[in-house]
Image (cartoon, grey):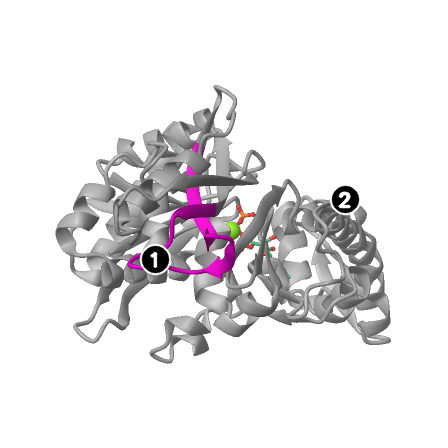
Amino acid sequence: MVGLDLGSTKLAVAVGEVNPDHSLTVLALSHIDSSGMRRGNVIDIESSARAIDELLDGVERIAGTHITSARVGFSGTSVSTVTNRATIAVTNPHHEINSDDINRAIQAAQMIPVSLDRSVVHIIPRQFIVDGYEGVVDPLGMMGSRLEVEVIIVTAMTSALQNMVKTVSRTGTKVKEIVLSSLQAAEAVLLPAEKEMGVALIDIGGGTSDIAVFDQGSLVFASVLPIGGDYITRDLAVGLRTTIDEARRIKENFGYANVNLAPDGKVVEISSIYGKDSRQVSEKTIASIIQPRVEELLELLALELRRTGYGGVLPAGIVLTGGTSLLKGIIPIGEEYLNMPMRIGFPENVGYGINQQYGPEYAAVLGNLLYGARLVNNLAGEQQDRLMGGFLSKISHWFKELFS
Ligand SMILES: Nc1ncnc2c1ncn2[C@@H]1O[C@H](COP(=O)(O)OP(=O)(O)OP(=O)(O)O)[C@@H](O)[C@H]1O
Ligand SMILES: [Mg+2]
């Protein structure tokens, strides 16, 4: 199994295999600097494809396998979600609900007006209602005459999806499936109890902040904001009159999200734009440039959560992942702005002790493998092959979700 995460900062790939006991072994994980990507979207197919090619060549050597297909994570500001419900009559004369009834209910529920330039990426059943009884997780085999389903539908711009597929295909690699990036990250970092209680996963990368809210065990909302750690880096470069690369190094090594946390009297050597001479700047000064940008970012996240009705009300709080979750002091200031408990999400669900090795910036790519492993574990091979087909088809994805 191969997972690809095409981020704005780095392109990452993970290779894994599902063991006979259903556990996952990560065989290789590799990344290179991103190219041709901006805010989760491909903006230069040629240069992205070249970088992916190089990335895959490298990981093929490490894993000792030839990669022919990959499951690809998808992000970008065009991602949005909508919930819908539909009811069907159970046709079986004995009123025992079969998979055909479930199919029909879900197909009816996906009949929403999606504009012509958008495609459905996932249709995820949240709950079934059998003869008025709410909260049924799997109605197969239950007795009833009316089957209702509530689904969450994830859509994105068709062109953005097509460009991603085109880019990966250009390297001779088949796109097995496209999966919402934050759904994958959730696989790697969230606990089932958190999803049950109500939790928001926020993956703050370089160019985007991906939000996924879970409640009663399933996804209830997802969106992507066009802002991430690079916003902080750019402002730091201007403020310190240095290069983007140097600003990023300074941010990652000496940056604090809050001026009050930066130690007094400590100074950092910063090279100038021309790289010839260097200056000394205090860590307090560096933090004073970073903090306002962090506050703006958190303000936008708080606004987005309030807009959807989940601001301040999720019992399991926020799990922060992605590279920017490593910014020193981001948790306390994040808790203050989002008004909920917060923790950093390391990809601990992957197991095999690799959580010691890999940071939160690999949550999405490692979660990609876990997502794939769950499908392998839950579907018979033949059925899975059939369903893995047209990823852009409007009826394929719910089925995988349904049995996961
Ligand atoms: N120790 C650190 N402290 C602060 N910021 C960090 C640290 N390590 C990485 N970052 C920042 O995290 C960002 C990259 O995160 P990540 O690798 O998750 O992004 P990405 O997945 O490539 O991008 P995106 O998901 O936005 O498309 C960069 O802005 C980087 O500077
Ligand atoms: Mg990312």
Question: How would you rate the neighbour count of disc 2 (Cα within 10 Å): few for under 14, some for 14-19, many for 20 or more?
Answer: few
Q: Secondary structure at mark 1?
A: loop
Q: Is residue 123 magenta?
A: yes
Q: Which residue is mark 2?
A: 238
| Nearer to the camera, 253 or 202 | 202
Q: Name the amino acid, label 2.
A: Val
Q: Position of residue 317 (x, y in %)?
A: 67, 67
Q: Name the amino acid, label 1.
A: Met
Alpha-carbon distance for marks 1 and 2? 66 Å
Q: Is residue 350 magenta?
A: no
The answer to whether residue 104 shows anywhere in this view is yes
Q: Is residue 62 left or right of residue 327?
A: left
The answer to whether residue 363 shows anywhere in this view is no
Q: Residue at x 28, y 31 (%)?
A: 170
Q: Residue at x 33, y 53 (%)?
A: 3
Magenta residues span 120-149
| Nearer to the camera, 166 or 51 | 166
